[in-house]
Image (spheres, grey):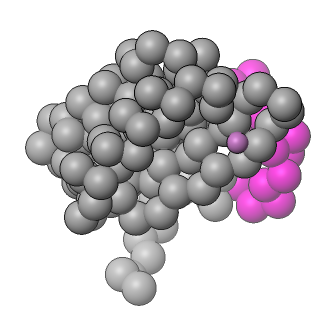
Amino acid sequence: MSSLERVGVSLDQHLLAEFDQLTAKQGYTNRSEAIRDLIRDRLSAEQLEKPTANAVAGIFLVYDHHSTALTNKLLHLQHDHVLNIVASTHIHLDHHNCLEIIIVKDKVQKIQALADKMGSLKGVKLSKTNMISIT
Ligand code: NI
């Protein structure tokens, strides 16, 4: 662990009260930890702006499994990216709908390209990608 450095920050009382309220709602019991997480989150967001930054993402897809052509295309795409796909899981939501979560580790732009390719396939009803930076 790197060494800690203590810093003093001047904040408007109202802003601090709002911050404390928010972090308490989120379950923080320690203001320093909340501030550290906020800084990490901002730094991570900055990293994700770079197309060549390393990242890991969960690609969430909801689709109708009755479309066998779509199921095959999704499988082909996953096999084409086998070295970068860390895991995938399939959940049967109801009679028609499936949720597939594909966890992929790659450069930001490659993850986005794969997510776009999957999300735009005919039959995919909903697609969301949740990406975090890794160093
Ligand atoms: Ni299913």
Residue at the spot 46% in from the left edge and 54% down from the top edge: 103
- As rendered, which of 68 and 122 lies closer to the eye? 68
Report the residue at 65% width, 26% height from top. Answer: 66
Q: Is residue 48 left or right of residue 21?
A: left
From the top left corner, tell me how far across and down residue 55 is, in percent: 31, 52
Foreground residue among 10 and 125 = 125
Asked if 10 appears above or below 101 in the picture, the reply is above
Q: Quadrant of residue 19?
A: top right
Report the front residue among 15 and 75: 75
In the rendering, at what x and y percent does residue 35 appear? 58, 50
- Give, as a single range, the part of the protein colored magenta: 14-31
Residue 13: x and y in percent read 73, 28
Res 6 seen here: yes
- For residue 40, say whether it is visible: no
Which residue occupies 85% across, 33% down? 94
Which quadrant contains ligand 1?
top right
